[in-house]
Every structure is written in structure tokens, then in C-alpha cells.
Image: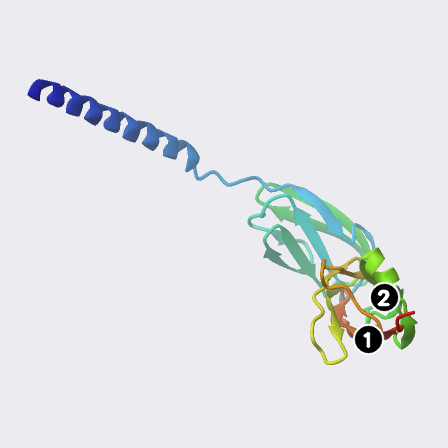
Amino acid sequence: MTKLFRTFALLLAGLLALSLIVGCGGDDGDDSGEPVPANFVSATPPGGEIAANGSITVTFDNAPADVTVSAGTVTVAGKTATIAGPFTPGPLALTVTWADGTQALNYTVTAPDTDPPAVTGGTVKDGDKDVDPEAINTAAAIEIEFSEDVSGNVALQTEGGDDVGWLGKVEGNKATLELVKGKEIGNETTYVIAGKVSDAAGNSTDVSVTFVTKGKE
């Protein structure tokens, strides 16, 4: 019996040693330390005109390393690089260089942009009354359009400033508020779309669109 236990113990020790060896080998393969290459995906704007005090956003498929630019200053955050002016008015042949490659971008630099973005339309307008809440809840979204591409944030609030709980998103020249189930708007209520957006030149606008929903029929 003692011999049997001794044999079992030796077998168990051998299996444990083997598992440690295999485990170590696997770790070596996973921790190679090789950086993941970053490839250019897009630039916003992709070309055309840009204000002297504007900015360009370059997106990669992975976080880039050692990013430099031939004009302006660059700031990297995750998979994006933001290139800010001031740029010299006239033709701009911009070269973006990073550890894995280069990308040429061509623009025409115009005078500095000093005009803030303006609200040009949307699902509701500031001061609207008798807005049908059922129609908005059915569409499950409220949109606000601007005079140019912007970034920033918006929220749907009550008249007292409480967040209603809709999801706000700003993309391109549009802000969208998406309905969260259970957070539908009601009748005879004053709502405010509030937030702040900025254009590529840093000109900002405070968003405040107030509307009142109609009573129950």
C-alpha cells in the first residue's frame, strides 16, 4: 500500500511539473511585447478648406506611437490624433508621420473662423408649444441641427434642470437625444434641451431649446 501511495505521489508531482512548464511556455508566447501596428483610417475634415485656427482629427485603427506633423501641433488620445493650428493661409500639404507609416493630407487654409456654430433646425424649435409627446416617443429621438460640424454634449432636462435620462450624442452637424425605455416624455410639460457645442476652431455655443408638450386629448 505504501508503495502504491508513493507511486501516485510521484505521478502527481510529474503532472504538476509538466503543467508548470506548459504554462510558462504559453506565457512567453502571449507576452511577446510586440507593439500592435497602427494604420490610418480617416481624417476629419478629409481635405478642402480649413480655417487658420481650425483643427484636424486623424483616426487610426490602433493607438499610434511617435506621431509628428509637418504643420501645427499634435495631441494624441487613444486612437485619435488632433492637429491644431494656427495654420498659414494658403495651400497646406500636411504630412502626418507615426511609427508605422505616413499620410499626406491637402487643404486650403482660409482666414480664422470667429463665428460660433448656430442652431439651424431640428425636431423642435426654441419656444415651440403644443408639441405632441407621442410622436416624439414613437420616433424615440430628438434631433438638433447646427450650421457646421460640432463636438460637445447635450441633455434633455425638465424646466427645473433635472436630467430626463435620454442619451445625448453629438456627431457631425447634428445632436441627437435617444429615448431610454421608461423615460418617455409626458403631456403638458416644459422640457429644455441644454448643452454646449464647439466647432473645429474652438468657437462655442450654449445650447438651450425650450419646448412645451400639449395636453392630453
Q: Secondary structure at mark 2?
A: helix
Q: Amino acid at mark 2?
A: Pro
Q: Position of residue 118 (x, y in %)?
A: 86, 70
Q: Secondary structure at mark 1?
A: loop
- Residue identified by numbered label 1: 189
Residue 124 shows up from this direction: yes
Label number found at residue 159: none
Asked if residue 203 is positioned above or below residue 66 in the image, the reply reads: below
Residue at 90% across, 70% down: 131
Colour convention: rainbow
Observer-nearest of 116 and 21: 21
Observer-nearest of 73 and 119: 119
Q: Position of residue 63 (x, y in %)?
A: 58, 48
Q: Amino acid at mark 1?
A: Thr
Residue at 84% across, 67% down: 111
Q: Position of residue 60 (x, y in %)?
A: 65, 46
Residue at 88% across, 75% down: 126
C-alpha distance separating marks 1 and 2 = 9 Å
Could you tell me if the residues under marks 1 and 2 are in contact, i.e. CB atoms within 8 Å?
yes
In the displayed orientation, state which residue is furthest to the front: 217
Observer-nearest of 203 and 121: 121
Q: Position of residue 41 (x, y in %)?
A: 70, 43
- Residue identified by numbered label 2: 133
